[in-house]
Amino acid sequence: MEDYPKSLLEFEDRFSTDEGCREYLYQLRWPEGFICPRCKGRTAWPATRDRIICGTCRYQASITAGTIFQGVRKPLRLWFRAMWYVTSQKNGASAMGLQRVLGLGSYVTAWTWLHKLRRAMVRPGRDRLEGEIEVDETYVGGEEEGVRGRQTERKTLVAIAVEKKGRNGFGRIRMACIPDASSESLLGFIKQAVKPGSLIYTDEWEGYRGLEGNGYRHKITVLKGQGKAAAIRLLPRVHRIAGLLKRWLLGTHQGRVGPEHLDYYLDEYTFRFNRRTSRSRGKLFYRLVQQAVQLDPVPYKDIVAGTRGKHQKSLMPQDIVGGGAN
Ligand SMILES: [Zn+2]
């Protein structure tokens, strides 16, 4: 059962102490009841604060160890407030906004927290799109159209996939930075983001030619020389998403996003967009906490460098399972 606060008041009542926060982490980490990380024993009793003792082998398990909350110095209730703030705001939060709301001592702390949380937002290789999908690439970080097929210095190439829903509707989206518009890069993205058997709509760029050989159906909708207006008309959803993404980066984040960190902003945008119809913002909060306790700790140096690190172990094919975005 999905258990989450339905309102700010419920949130404040429940997570006003670190104990309340730990209890929630415990529930989400062991939804079927405690399982000892060492002996797989099922009985446990509480020790001190963060620790529980395995009733079988006496192993002292930590509720936060092995999650992104491992070793955090600030109170958990402050982290919970950050997660609530990020998920309850329609456009998320900037580092400066979070710093102000939580009264954090430094901008760097707020920035690092947001990046940690972003890593819990999209689990790569999961929830692949299906059905009819528009795919295109766009440059992010520059004003005008770039030269196709290579990455320019300031701009990063971003691949976007959008599920078509009805005549004009949007389903879910997936996005990722790609090094270039080669068929290797584009097919690599599509395999991660879209289930085989789906019908993919693209323009006639040669990088998409291998789709049918890889188990996808493929329809070319925009032909050479038809220009930008035709592309917007014939692949309207990806162009709409590209526009919204750029506006969000320039608005909420004032364009201050380095290319090495862009992937994580894409994850955050995707997380929120794919849950835009959720009746309760509390559900986004729930999903974020749930994914955060399933994620390995992310070292600060990986966050600064923007590297995926070992927390991305969930990329293994056996982890690719179906399931809705909510
Ligand atoms: Zn044990």
Image: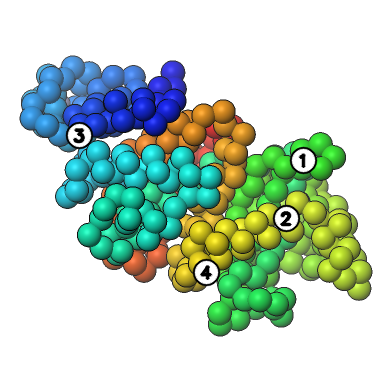
In the picture provided, is 62 more to the left or to the right than 14?
Answer: left
* Residue placed under numbered mark 3 in the picture: 18
Under circle 1, the secondary element is strand
Q: Are marks 4 and 2 in contact (CB under 8 Å)?
A: no
Query: How packed is label 2: few (under 14 Cα within 10 Å), some, or many (20 or more)?
Result: few
Q: Quadrant of residue 260?
A: bottom left
Under circle 2, the secondary element is helix
Give the residue type that dot 3 points to.
Asp
Q: Residue at x 72, y 52 (%)?
A: 214
Q: For residue 169, which numbered disc appears in the image? A: 1
Q: Are marks 1 and 3 in contact (CB under 8 Å)?
A: no
Alpha carbon separation for disc pair 1 and 3: 42 Å
Q: For residue 198, which numbered disc appears in the image? A: none
Under circle 3, the secondary element is helix
Q: Earlier in the sequence, mark 1 or mark 2?
A: 1
Alpha carbon separation for disc pair 4 and 1: 28 Å
Q: Is residue 316 above or below residue 16?
A: below
Residue 301 can be seen, yes or no: yes
Q: Quadrant of residue 208?
A: bottom right
Q: Nearer the viewer, mark 4 or mark 1?
A: 4
Query: How packed is label 4: few (under 14 Cα within 10 Å), some, or many (20 or more)?
Result: some
Q: How is the image coloured?
A: rainbow
Q: For residue 255, which numbered disc appears in the image? A: 4
Q: Is residue 140 above or below residue 21?
A: below
Give the residue type that dot 2 points to.
Arg
Q: Residue at x 56, y 82 (%)?
A: 153
* Residue placed under numbered mark 2 in the picture: 240
Q: Earlier in the sequence, mark 3 or mark 2?
A: 3
Ligand 1 within 8 A of label 4's CB? no
Give the residue type that dot 4 points to.
Gly
